[in-house]
Amino acid sequence: MRKDMHHKSWNEIKTNDSWAIFKIMGEFVNGYEKLSQIGPCVSVFGSARTKPDHKYYKLAEEVTRKIVESGYGIITGGGPGIMEAGNKGAHLAGGTSVGLNIDLPFEQHDNPYIDADKNLNFDYFFVRKVMFVKYAQGFVVLPGGFGTLDELFEALTLIQTHKIARFPIILVGTEFWGGLVDWIKDTLLEKAGNISPDDLDLFAVVDTADEVCEVLNKFYNKYNLSPNF
């Protein structure tokens, strides 16, 4: 139950929900207009809590710098931690650096490495998530928490169910992701039979920036696609 429901009548709640449709529509329109102009980009995810001296922060910066050198821009959630590292790598490499911000307990400020005209703010998680998927030619997922897992499994589900076109999903850090991948294989696939063997091909697990770029380039070469599609 929403926290304000105790103080409002049911009719007031219904009226507010109806008017919220226009705000939601506005977020979609603004997002579509701005992001349709950015060119081929890769969405990068990871924890807002990761500090600049952490190895995964430094790895995220290296990964995004090399992605830019391969011809892509970078989209992040716009906050601190891995998101900041992602935008920083893109910015220092002279590439497109996009931030899709939302007010969260551990993500309360924009990082300074987002292009001035590519810094978008959202009130609705689901609108923001659409933008991450719609305008990305790949997902690079570094270690994170519930939000990172949410984005990862949403993308996997959409591709698995053919709701969106396939694109590469790359998990960075076998030390971090190994346990989850083992559980997917041993429990979801082998014990429960809740996914198909081919579903394991929907993502790759790597450890280096060069491997990330190799997976991206190999995907688009294999399917003879341009990352501008």
Image: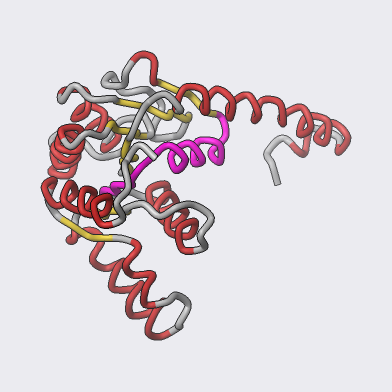
Q: How is the image coloured?
A: secondary structure
Residue displayed at 29% across by 68% down: 181
The residue lying furthest to the front in this view is 224
Percent position (x, y) of residue 163?
Answer: 53, 55
Q: Is residue 134 magenta?
A: yes
Reply above or below: 30 against 57: above
Q: Which residues are magenta?
A: 123-142
Q: In this orientation, which residue lies closer to the viewer: 38 or 28?
A: 38
Residue 201 x/y as whole percent:
32, 67
Magenta stretch: includes residue 83: no
| Total number of numbered discs in the rendering | 0
Horizontal arrangement in the rendering, residue 13 relative to residue 118 (left or right): right
Q: Quadrant of residue 133?
A: top left
Q: Position of residue 134 (x, y in %)?
A: 47, 40
Q: Quadrant of the C terminus?
A: top left
Residue, x 31% and y 21% (percent of image)?
114
On screen, 224 above or below 51?
below
Residue under the point 47% across and 30% down: 102
Q: State left or right for residue 193 relative to residue 89.
A: right
